[in-house]
Amino acid sequence: MTADAVLSRIDDQLTPALDRLMAFLRIPSISTDPAHKDACLQAADWLVNDLRSIGIAAERRDTPGHPMVVGHVPGDGPHLLFYGHYDVQPVDPLDLWETDPFEPVLQDTEKNGQVIRARGASDDKGQLMTFVEACRAWKEVNGTLPCQLTFFFEGEEESGSPSLIPFLKDNAKELSADIALVCDTSMVAPGVPSIASQLRGMLKDEFTLHGPRIDLHSGHYGGPALNPLKEIARIIASFHDETGRVAIEGFYEGVEEVPDELLRQWQNCGFDEESYLGSVGLSRPHGEEGYSTLVQQWARPTLEINGLWGGYQGAGSKTVIPAEAHCKLTCRLVGDMDPDAVRERLRAHVEARLPVDARVTWDNDLDGSPAAVMDISRPEFERARQALSDEWGREAVFAGMGGSIPVTRHFKDILGLESMLIGFAQEDDAIHSPNEKYNVESFHKGMRSWVRVLDSLSRRT
Amino acid sequence: MTADAVLSRIDDQLTPALDRLMAFLRIPSISTDPAHKDACLQAADWLVNDLRSIGIAAERRDTPGHPMVVGHVPGDGPHLLFYGHYDVQPVDPLDLWETDPFEPVLQDTEKNGQVIRARGASDDKGQLMTFVEACRAWKEVNGTLPCQLTFFFEGEEESGSPSLIPFLKDNAKELSADIALVCDTSMVAPGVPSIASQLRGMLKDEFTLHGPRIDLHSGHYGGPALNPLKEIARIIASFHDETGRVAIEGFYEGVEEVPDELLRQWQNCGFDEESYLGSVGLSRPHGEEGYSTLVQQWARPTLEINGLWGGYQGAGSKTVIPAEAHCKLTCRLVGDMDPDAVRERLRAHVEARLPVDARVTWDNDLDGSPAAVMDISRPEFERARQALSDEWGREAVFAGMGGSIPVTRHFKDILGLESMLIGFAQEDDAIHSPNEKYNVESFHKGMRSWVRVLDSLSRRT
């Protein structure tokens, strides 16, 4: 195949590829911290120069926040857009890092072989570089790239992407393509190549339950007083039934069971439920009865309490009946669940359960987004799956994801662009945590994977 | 009666009596604040001098904390011990005070007539001075006091009374008497003289529910993860049934219904349920169905959540499933309820409801004390009730109290001494809050009440 020589070159050139990644990792591009604004500029410029060194016409595109980087490769055949982000998470708590987060090192480990350790090694500098390096090797071997390509990198993914939507809207025509490729996800298990084909959506909400006009003394008023802490507990307890199912009327509207074929793939995807749960101190799944851990976290909606508070939290005891109690929650959404409808039902559920003398207020600044379900019937998905299976010697799976990747939603809504999420991160990469790492195997076989995917997608059938 | 001349003197000498109280109130004897240690000494010395100025042999008795003040009046007839406390609560938030908390002022008010406004005006300097001033007037009119008296004042009531138990034990013989009189309680309604004859006990407890080993991401783990916030809400919701009754097995052991005669008194005591609840924003009692507000807070046990927390409490949203959730609670106890047995049952209730993978830890530093029920069959109670009824022109009531006054328990346990709690404070005195006040009527008729009570108790039948 055309790609064989490219794969060989990747094997030969692993060391310089790692060197380039390490140079990129040395730039402390923490997007959420204003003190690192210059570093973000520097990272964007580094990417522009790296793309130009492959002969790709790339430029920094400034925004009110951190800049975008856009590069174009003209050509025939399908038009692919590749997305990644050059910004990284903050590094605190710094004292838990065993090495300098911005002085990347290669380390030999028992569990993962050689790893590259640094902030951003996995999320997302290491991952995005698998694609860039695949293009470099292709270009160096063949003199051209196999199809029309657009590179699109942002520097605000870890800080809410405030410039993303306006930029996509302002540059919709320039950024149009046939399909988007995103390298920002994990493999479902070590060695199991994975295409994330469904991501849960999310609805955030928060309420305060108000009871007495003021905090009361639990001696004087205890008994006759309405206690907001007791009442909020009662309401929260009503959110689920005994089987772990959400008990809000109409909550499951738009939810479908996982098709048998997909379920079969998931069952054989190598996901180790026992070790996944055991690593965080759990012995069994605690969600809806009758669903496996994977189905519970990839394909079933949830209502999770993320914060709950009221009354006294200091040392010792305080005989108070507080005037208020507070609850933050998020719902993960699947299928066709409509965030607005779910919000309305959730609120109606709470309001119907308020006792006399209580009232509830809601935070109206929290948003929601529906689930993203990729159209895996498109031929690109099956081709990519085959390419990944060839590289890893293992059937690749269409996996779900418990979390959300908002950019895919914006690509769909603004650009009409389907996304294919292929990533090589591992569950233990410690993204967002101290001592982040990326397996050198992920990097190496990731580059090789993209060569095969590019080859497969660019062929005209 | 012997007392008539004394009552007249009290009427004549109201102004100098108020002046003495104001001098006492100027001393900022905040016991919990080490910066006010000298002020506590000064308040103790002020009391010693005030008692000596009536001809009572009094002295300051130092302790590892703030000193006690003890004074003795030898004599025939019954031996009464009078207890009060010269320390006061802190004054924060200071900016909510309309006058200097330690610069007492007389103010005319629409609702309460003339009031004296200062920290401690009601709790407990104004109240304890009603007794001291009654004795002064008696002595000035009659040259002697009517019976054997012991004065006992502490300066640590507002900071947990750490020196009280050792002092009582070390001086048990000296402090023995026939009955203790305590002036540190309220009237059940304006104009209704009240003897507190039953005080609820209290049990404090706190638990932490532990779930996953670490905080988890509610996208990745939401569904299969055990959520401690959901589980703690479920457990708290199980503490009460739908009628407001505590649903812990055996919780009500030792609880008796209020005797009909007492119930009748309470029903006619002038307590205004609507205004009592309405003043804090409630329209009806929220405790056990079938019991009035007064019965719920005086004679029924409670389980109140005083603090509840876990997860994220900051602005916006955080997709966390926390590793832990926390709950602080107190039970108010009545009748013969045993704090240790209730603690055991409470804990068993929680532990029986833990899901797989959860565990609970308890704070073992929190104490408990049983309810105090006075022996109102003793003749002193009926005599005092008659004396109070005469003064106020209104049948005095044996009232309950929702809170606890631990000193009465220690008098009983260490000295074998029954307490009679007679106080003239009003619900709106704002004790422990900014702008504390004491009605001049409470002070004036309080002094007069004690003259009548002294007269009545000191007579040999």
Image: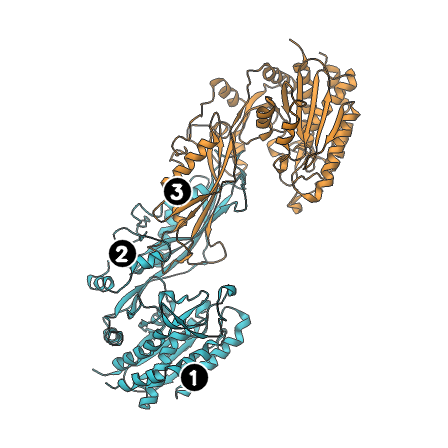
Chain colours: A cyan, B orange
Q: Disc 1 and disc 3: Cα gap in Å?
A: 57 Å
Say above or below: B179 vs A423: above
What amino acid type should be assigned to the residue bearing mark 1?
Asp
What amino acid type should be assigned to the residue bearing mark 2?
Ser
Q: Is residue A198 left or right of residue B23?
A: left
Q: Which residue is under mark 3?
A: B235
Q: Position of residue B38 (x, y in %)?
A: 74, 40
Q: Residue at x 55, y 19 (%)?
A: B375
Q: Residue at x 40, y 75 (%)?
A: A126
Report helix, strand or loop for mark 1. Answer: helix
Q: Residues within 10 Å of mark 2 (few under 14, many from 20)?
A: some
Q: Is residue A14 left or right of residue A457?
A: right
Residue at the extreme top: B461
Q: Using the rendered image, report if marks 2 and 1 lie on a common chain.
A: yes
Q: Position of residue A351 (x, y in %)?
A: 40, 46
Mark 2 or 1, nearer chain start: 1
Q: Nearer the viewer, residue A147 or B308?
A: B308
Q: Using the rendered image, report if marks 1 and 3 lie on a common chain.
A: no
Q: Which residue is under mark 2?
A: A292
What amino acid type should be assigned to the residue bearing mark 3?
Ile
Q: Position of residue A203 (x, y in %)?
A: 38, 58
* The label number, if any, that marks residue A50 in the structure image: 1
Report helix, strand or loop for mark 2. Answer: loop
Report which quarter residue A238 is drawn in.
Answer: top left
